[in-house]
Image: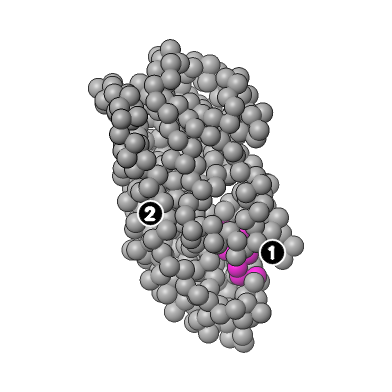
Amino acid sequence: MTVSPGQPRDILISGAGIAGPALAYWLHRYGFTPTVVERAPALREGGYAVDFRGPVHLDLLSRMGIRDEVEHARTGTGDSWYVNARGKKLARMPAEQTGGDVEILRGDLVRVLYEATMDETEYVFGDSITALEETADGVNVTFEHAAPRSFDLVIGADGLHSRVRSLAFGPERSYVKHLGLHCAIFTTPNYLALDHSGLVYGEPKRIVVYSARENTEARVLLYFASPPLSYDRVDGDRQRGIVHEAFAGARWETPRLLELMATAPDLYFDSVSTIKMDSWSRGRIALLGDAGYCPSSLSGVGTGLAVVGAYVLAGELATAGGDHATAFARYESAMRSYVDGCQKLADSASMMVPANRFLAGLMRLNMRMMPLMPWLRDLPAKMARRAASAITLPQYPTVG
């Protein structure tokens, strides 16, 4: 199936992370002309490991023709271990609990999606949208640097702090549900000599370190409980200061990790939050992935959710006969219950970071009991897989 006369053809996508390029892939397959604008000057190579879980996610990777590449770039991380302040291993966390069926570094997945779309999609790096003006037959878009342009539709796939959402739907505070946590993620040398494995420590707070890229480096995740914080999201020094304050006095490898954070090339710091919206579209503008329905970075299903959403949104646009309002409504109808199920994981996932030493002690006791209760150990992975698989993908007309 290809675009017919009267259908919107030129579609601007904001965000070159995961959701945006995945949508561009399917739009091109259906004969649309996608353009992707990305605020960063180049692909964002950093980030943590992301997961694909269950038959729905894996089927979509196969349909996109990228499953072999994703499998080839998988982290290969095995079991992780909960440790105490002296580094003693207390309990094993099976690889399938943390890594799903396929685990890949976010930056590697971004590269795979970009390479799969770069020949047919116009990418504009180092720029961002500053204004959107909807007209009877399109959207006039103003950019920070480039000259204004007009598109038939605009899709916001620009993450938790979506510029498109703010411009078209209103202030971020109206849609963000803060889960009481903040997280810092960065790359360090693999000085702990981890061999395709990870270590987890909590006292309270939660520290995760795992090897990456064939053990040549490591990823560090620092979680701590906190109410919403006010800070400049481009001020890395202030963000490092917040993390230092939060982890002052923490034991295990914490002092060394904080030292390494100072020179990390890819610090990411943000709240752990979900996005709740009654509608993901307004006129000719729609939202995709974290911009519209972020399930939180602790859910383990956000990446697969974005890829599923891209497939459904493109398919509905292709079958709507030029009626974007119908396409957007069908997209929401097909995705709403799936999104709700994935977002429910966020509330239980936030409990992984104890808010005080009493709860941290209970968690350590729970970890020691895990070998006696394998069903409890495996429960989080089963819940995530069930949520990730809880959709029957619509069958759209054959591309041709």
Q: Which residue is mark 1?
A: 121
- 185 and 280: which one is in front? 185
Q: Does any portion of residue 203 appear in the rendered image?
A: yes
Describe the colour scheme in one phrase: one colour
Q: Which residue is mark 2?
A: 386
Q: CA distance from mark 2 to mark 1?
A: 34 Å
- Magenta segment main secondary structure: helix
Spot the residue most to the right: 119
Q: Position of residue 125 (x, y in %)?
A: 67, 52
Specify start and end residues of the magenta stretch as a single range.
19-28
- Structural crowding at the residue carrying mark 1, measured as other residues with C-alpha within 10 Å and reported as few (<14), some (14–19) or many (≥20): some
| Quarter of the figure that contains the N terminus | bottom right
Q: Earlier in the sequence, mark 2 or mark 1?
A: 1
Tell me the residue at 65%/35% (across/down).
213
- Which quadrant would residue 399 be assigned to in this image? bottom right
Q: Position of residue 190 (x, y in %)?
A: 61, 24
Dot 2 amino acid type: Arg
Q: Is residue 263 above or below residue 138?
A: above
- Which quadrant would residue 249 be assigned to in this image? top left
Mark 2 residue element = helix
Is the residue under label 1 in contact with that under label 2 (CB below 8 Å)?
Answer: no
Q: In the image, is 225 to the left or to the right of 27?
A: left
| Quarter of the figure that contains the C terminus | bottom right
Q: Position of residue 292 (x, y in %)?
A: 43, 58
- 34 and 334: which one is in front? 334
